[in-house]
Image (spheres, rainbow, N blue to C red):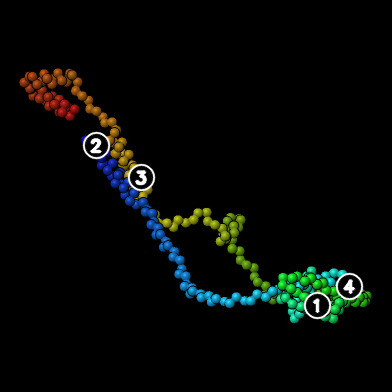
Amino acid sequence: MQRRMISYSMMVCGVLAMVIGFALLPLPASSTAAPALQPSPRPTIPPVTVLPASSPTSVPMGRVTGTIIDLRTHAPTANIAVKIGDAVVYSDANGNYDRWVESGFYTLELQLSSDQGSPAQAPLTIAVGPGDTVIAHLFFTSTAPSEPAFTVEAPTAVPTAAPVAVAPDIPAVIPPKLPYTGVAAGDKAVPAATSDQQPAQLPRTATTSPFNTQFWFVVGFLLLAGGLGLQFWPSRRRATPTPADERLLAELLSKPPRKDDEELLRSLLEGKEKG
């Protein structure tokens, strides 16, 4: 009976220790949801009032195009000014010019500078109708380039100065020899540890308590295991009375007790009650 009470007490203490260990477990941090982003308010756009515009009167148009050709090189020439009536256009990289004009009569002529040359034809008079394309090629003669005069000069030797050796500057004060900062170990000198070397083990800065969650779990497990082992461990059974003892007891009870027999009877009765 006493062993059973001890085993029950150990199991109850083990359960309490494990409950304390569960209570000391760190709780997960509650994450607060970020507020939903709201779109920025857009500025109010005032309505735009569109006024009806009067339709313009359509004017019939025509096209004037052609190529500017140099008679000296027999090739189209770029960047040549062409006067079409009062408008002036320039030929493109391929020597072509193009212009949309209103219907009517126009005079075409080249406007050349003194460096570009002189026209090879008189001004042309053309008639442009609605939707017509008039092609008129214009010719001019460019100025021939003058041949440059080449002069050959004899090379002249340029004297070169001989290199001059410059001695390095010697400081006026020579600094003394720096002291040795190594640590002597026996006959060999061991240099002092530099800041670049990393320590073999980082120092432990966390604060630990001896009665943490792991401690209470271990204590609770040991108490539970001890209580269960004590509960189911086989107990030593006491010796049962033999038939000879039973017969002796019956004989003593049937006869009047004597003084010597009373002590023997008392010992037999106590042994039976304990059994």
Q: Earlier in the sequence, mark 4 or mark 2?
A: 2
Number of the front mark, 4 or 2: 4
| Residue carrying label 4 | 72
Residue under label 1, please give it: 125
Question: Which callout, 4 or 3, points to the residue nearer the camera?
Answer: 4
- Give the residue at x 22% y 25%: 239
Q: Residues within 10 Å of mark 2 (few under 14, many from 20)?
A: some
4 and 2 marks in contact (CB < 8 Å): no
The reply, left or right, for residue 265 in relation to residue 16 is left
> Could you say which disc has been placed on residue 160 in the image?
none
For disc 2, the marked residue is 4
Disc 4 residue type (three-letter)? Arg
CA distance for labels 2 and 3: 23 Å
| Left or right of 5, for residue 158 | right
Q: Nearer the viewer, residue 170 or 49?
A: 49
Badge 4 crowding class, 10 Å Cα cut-off, few under 14, some 14 to 19, many 20 or more, is few
Secondary structure state at the residue bearing disc 3: helix
Which residue ends up furthest to the left in the rendered image? Answer: 256
Amino acid type assigned to the residue bearing label 3 in the image: Val
Provide the residue designation for mark 3.
218
Q: Is residue 152 in view? A: yes
Location of residue 148 (image quadrant): bottom right
Q: What amino acid type should be assigned to the residue bearing mark 2?
A: Arg
